[in-house]
Amino acid sequence: MKRIGILGIIAGLAAVAYLGYMRKLPPSIQEHADKLVGWSEKRGLGDKVKDFKSKLTGDAPGHDDKARGVKPAPRKVALPDDSFLPIALALEKKRTHLLYLSKGKARSAVFKGLIWWEEDSGVSRLYVEKRHAPVTGPNGEKMKTKRKSSVHQLRRFEYGSGETFDLHPETIVGIVLEREDLTYPDEYKEFFLEERREILTVFGSEVVLGVHRATFLGGAHPVEADRTERIELEGGSVLQSRFERTRTSVTAAEFVQSKGRKLCRREHEGSVALRGPGGALIPAAVMGASAESCRGTLTYVMEKTAISELKRRGISMGHGARFRRGQIVVGETPVLKRVADVIPLVSLPATVAVKGDRFAAPTQGSKARKGELVFKAFDRSSKAISFGKVSPLIGSVALDMDRMDGKDVEYLKQIFEVPSAK
């Protein structure tokens, strides 16, 4: 009797875990069930729960359940046999991966730089270029200083028109001396301005930049400041942050508390939207250094509750597939496990994914852990095709042939030096 009682308790917990996993419990109980499901998955009990469920319902894993209308993953998926079919762009900080199909096989090509596609502007190259920032006198005359000043400018080259656009800042403004500065030439010759920019996230028709500005206009040491900028890619307009500063106050407070009283203590400077799993925009706390001696880079801390909610809710991949809790499932059949990030494709029963233990956020000036870039069809028989290690993605776009101009397809082929299919 004791053994039967223990088995009954285990069966009850398994049933609750399964119902929680399928989001079929009342709201008051669902929250606790989510914790139980997360606990079981961390300990590798997820498959056991599913096996137990199949025994309760009489269904073998992967079989159709007509009552629920859930279909399993097919054994084999047929992919288009075009000679060149671009399907996605995956952007790291300093390079872009083009994923494409050739004769039904997934392939990849890499370009050292950031290539982007947007329906209105077509194929573009995004880059930050160091531009000279002159030091001028009161009447506009150029003044010589010991150290050259510079400003990093966001630029965009549009392949369709052949034009280069100075997005932000549109005009480079250096240091303008006052008349009293000319009285002490030994002092103003030490003046300088350095403004560096780094692309943090590209999303649709906008980009988020991390900016570090250092100026020396006399005194004991340079004045340094850090900020983020949200820029519209078409014309370079400065946009307001997607999230209010208070949105990430709790995240910032938790981060400061976890770091304790370290030398470079951080303080909350605002909120910014960064690329999360599947290309979703996640609120992140912008943490600057409270001490002048620690200034130089910002730290970005993603909101944990937003990441957790995304994991719980999942991301629709189309064709009956869903990315949820670190795996891609079709119906209830896992087709790819240990998934940290995905690029949902538009018209193919497949995905581009980054395999890894957990999602790694792209952050300014840091070396985050790398994942494995793969292509996987939504079937049970094919293996994932690996394209090597990648850093956290700062942008991704699924390419839709119905919306792409034929010239854009040719531009991609030329940029990435794709060989002709034989």
Image (cartoon, rainbow, N blue to C red):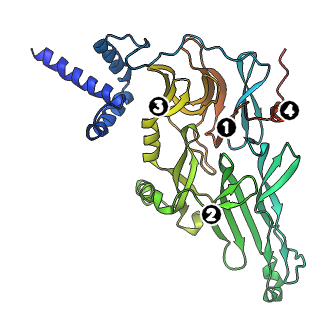
* Disc on the earlier residue, 4 or 3: 3
Disc 2 target residue? 226
Hey, which quadrant is residue 398 in on the image?
Answer: top right
Which mark sits nearer the N-terminus, 4 or 1? 1
Q: Position of residue 204 (x, y in %)?
A: 66, 45
Gap in angstroms between the C-alphas marked 1 and 3: 20 Å
In the structure shown, which secondary structural element does the residue marked by tag 1 occupy? strand
Give the residue pinned by disc 3.
324
Q: Which image quarter: residue 169?
A: bottom right
Label 3, label 2: how many angstroms apart (C-alpha)? 36 Å
Three-letter code, disc 4 = Gln
Tell me whether the residue at label 4 lies in contact with that at label 3, contact meaning CB atoms closer than 8 angstroms.
no
Name the residue that disc number 4 marks.
414
Q: Amino acid at mark 1?
A: Val
Residue 213 position in % (x across, y down): 68, 65
- Which of marks 2 and 1 precedes in the sequence? 2
User: Badge 4 local density, few (<14 within 10 Å), some, or many (20+)?
Assistant: few
Q: Quadrant of residue 241?
A: bottom right
The vertical placement of 140 against 254, above or below, is below
Residue located 50% across and 62% down the image:
245
402 or 351, which is in the foreground?
A: 402
Q: Which residue is mark 1?
A: 397
Of the 4 image quadrants, the one containing the N terminus is: top left
